[in-house]
């Protein structure tokens, strides 16, 4: 038996909570820089298809390329196949790259951009790819040794142990995941639809604890670690994400559309695209674009449609709504914003079982009160959505998270190189550099996301692209050292 006050074993240099894109990219970056004593723990019972599509834009791709080149190559390949799946023959290779157009309610094009890699590459020195969240996770996860990424570990507590120069984290297994109204998927769905085992069939839950020199919390917008480390601090009011004021009402499928209606929608709005956004330009001109309801229509093969309506709604209006009530609410919002009858008719044909609603939440990068919530408390640091999650209106959530991963990788690798794992001054300095670099940019990105101002004119668009897409990530990382 160990004497009572002997030091416990430190299991890892770095423990990462959350095997989403940010946690996994960080783990890959750290391993590539020689830090092998790493573990990534995720609450999911098993890795399986969940989540939505994610657009990776030049800044996110540059950050990923810097962090782990092979991950970047694999993800680029997977994403490009999704946009242009059949590239075998010469004719297929010459097919035009699909575009995403925004149209007004009369069907006139307001703006558009190519969904392919090359157009962005030519403009910003790096391209764009679309990829499903699951494919992104899988591509990153499979580059790590199997024993490094563990499922079925929900972090429930984190405790600083300064006397042992480490942090302890406690995990439970075999529990049904808690409802998570803040995330981009519902855990209920994850568990009900894809799991073949119910929690009652699993062995009793176990609590496991691990100790690490540093703990990176990449556990998403409803971060448990954030709630634990902010508890009883001046930041406690920022533990949970705040409602952004805008919600999505969506349908996975509208079937059985009368031919005449389908044809009219095709000719007026879709015009051969796979995806189109429609908004009332008159309303957008007098308010920010986010205060303007808009519908994103997905045209599927075999004449079916899916859609996503983004609209400002009080939270109470959404709570507990049935599928039928969501359809009625969606039609009401479209009517108020003077959308044409044909769009309202299409929404009226939605199947109630396919309806979903999703309020969007945010962790503000800067708050108006005196206590800016710090992104680290001692040896624990927040990254990705856990630090600054936000709505997806400028498609920057994952991209900004990948920038965090690049910065974290650089700074923690330096701690490793200098063997400063026990040097709290060096650790605090590193995390403060991370925050000083990332917080001002996050503030700008969140402002752009909440107003969609960059989309309001060509000049704003260009300024935004300069600020966000064209930066030289490698050079920025050098400034950290
Ligand atoms: C509709 C929609 C579309 C989007 N589109 C885009 C886009 O086009 N471009 C873009 O850049 N971003 C997009 N995003 C945002 C993007 O998905 C997120 O910003 C990104 O996934 C955040 O990555 P993350 O690793 O920080 O967190 P997450 O992806 O949320 O991953 C967190 C991980 O932590 C695990 N976890 C949670 N709690 C615990 C716990 N207590 N213990 C252990 N594990 C835990 C979860 O299981 C999960 O695997 C979109 C989001 C939405 C809602």
Image: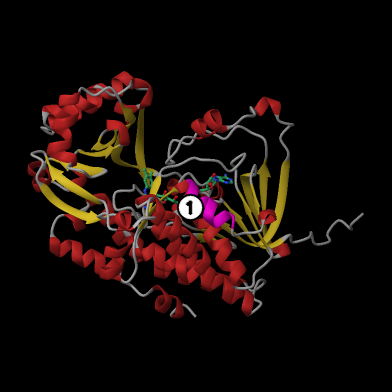
In the displayed structure, 397 sits above or below 358; it is below
User: Pointer 1: residues within 10 angstroms few (<14), some, or many (20+)?
Assistant: many
Residue 218 in view, yes or no: no
Q: In this view, does 241 lie above or below 326?
A: below
Left or right placement of residue 6 versus residue 31 in this view: right
Tell me how many marks there are: 1
User: Is 95 left or right of 479, judged from the image as shown?
Assistant: left
Asked if residue 474 shows in the view, the reply is yes
Q: Which residue is drawn at 50% across and 57% down?
A: 22
Q: Give the range drawn in magenta.
A: 134-142
Residue pictured at 25% horizontal, 65% vertical:
465
Residue 373 picture quarter: bottom left
Instruction: Give the image quarter of residue 178.
Output: top right
Instruction: Write down the quadrant of residue 387 in the picture.
Output: bottom left
Q: Looking at the image, which residue is at 34% across and 21% down?
A: 352
Position in image of residue 162 (x %, y %): 68, 63
Please tell me which residue lies in front, 56 or 199. Answer: 56
Front residue of 221/145: it is 145
The dominant secondary structure in magenta is: helix
Report the residue marked by disc 1: 136
Question: Residue 348: horizontal and vertical position, in percent?
Answer: 23, 22
Asked if disc 1 is less than 8 Å from ligand 1, the answer is yes
Q: In this view, does 405 lie above or below 362?
A: below
Q: Answer whether residue 140 is magenta in the image.
A: yes
Determine whether 152 is above or below 95 in the image.
above
Farthest residue to the right: give it: 1
Residue located at (65% from left, 28% from top):
199
From the top left corner, tell me how far across and down residue 35 is, in percent.
Answer: 64, 69
Asked if the stretch drawn in magenta spans residue 162, the answer is: no
User: Can you give x and y, in whole percent of width and height, for residue 7 in the image?
Assistant: 80, 62
């Amino acid at each position: 038996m160990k004497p009572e006050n002997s030091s416990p074993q430190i299991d890892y240099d770095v423990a990462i909570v959350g095997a989403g894109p940010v946690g996994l990219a960080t783990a890959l970056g750290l391993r590539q820089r020689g830090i092998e004593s790493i573990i990534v723990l995720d609450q999911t019972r098993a890795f399986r298809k969940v989540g939505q599509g994610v657009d990776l834009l030049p800044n996110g791709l540059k950050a990923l390329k810097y962090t782990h080149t092979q991950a970047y190559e694999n993800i680029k390949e997977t994403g490009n196949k999704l946009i242009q799946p059949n590239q075998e023959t010469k004719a297929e290779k010459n097919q035009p790259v699909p575009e995403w157009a925004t149209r007004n309610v009369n069907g006139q094009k307001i703006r558009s951009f190519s969904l392919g890699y090359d157009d962005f590459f030519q403009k910003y020195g790096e391209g764009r790819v679309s990829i499903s969240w699951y494919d992104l996770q899988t591509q990153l996860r499979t580059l790590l040794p199997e024993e490094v990424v563990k499922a079925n570990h929900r972090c429930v507590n984190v405790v600083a142990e300064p006397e042992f120069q480490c942090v302890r984290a406690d995990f439970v297994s075999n529990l049904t995941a808690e409802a998570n109204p803040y995330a981009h998927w519902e855990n209920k769905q994850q568990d009900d639809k894809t799991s073949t085992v119910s929690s009652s069939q699993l062995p009793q839950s176990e609590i496991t604890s691990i100790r690490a020199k540093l703990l990176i919390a990449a556990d998403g917008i409803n971060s448990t670690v954030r709630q634990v480390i902010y508890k009883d601090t001046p930041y406690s009011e920022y533990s949970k994400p705040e409602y952004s004021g805008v919600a999505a009402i969506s349908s996975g499928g509208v079937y059985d559309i009368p031919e005449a209606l389908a044809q009219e929608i095709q000719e007026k709005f879709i015009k051969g695209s796979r995806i189109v956004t429609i908004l009332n330009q008159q309303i957008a001109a007098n308010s920010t674009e986010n205060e303007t309801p808009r519908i994103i229509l997905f045209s599927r093969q075999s004449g079916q449609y899916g859609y996503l309506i983004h609209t400002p709604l009080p939270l109470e209006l959404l709570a507990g709504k049935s599928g039928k009530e969501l359809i009625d609410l969606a039609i009401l919002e479209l009517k108020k914003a003077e959308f044409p009858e044909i769009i309202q008719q299409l929404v009226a044909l939605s199947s109630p079982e396919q309806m979903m609603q999703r309020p969007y939440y945010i962790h503000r990068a800067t708050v108006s009160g005196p206590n800016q919530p710090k992104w680290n408390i001692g040896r624990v640091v927040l990254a990705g959505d856990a630090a600054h999650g936000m709505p997806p209106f400028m498609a920057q959530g994952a991209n900004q998270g990948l920038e965090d991963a690049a910065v974290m990788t650089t700074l923690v690798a330096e701690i490793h190189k200098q063997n400063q794992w026990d040097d709290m001054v060096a650790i605090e300095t590193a995390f403060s550099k991370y925050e000083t670099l990332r917080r001002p940019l996050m503030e700008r990105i969140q402002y752009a996301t909440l107003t969609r101002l960059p989309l309001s004119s060509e000049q704003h668009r260009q300024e935004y692209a300069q600020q966000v897409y064209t930066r030289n990530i490698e050079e920025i990382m050098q400034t950290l050292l």
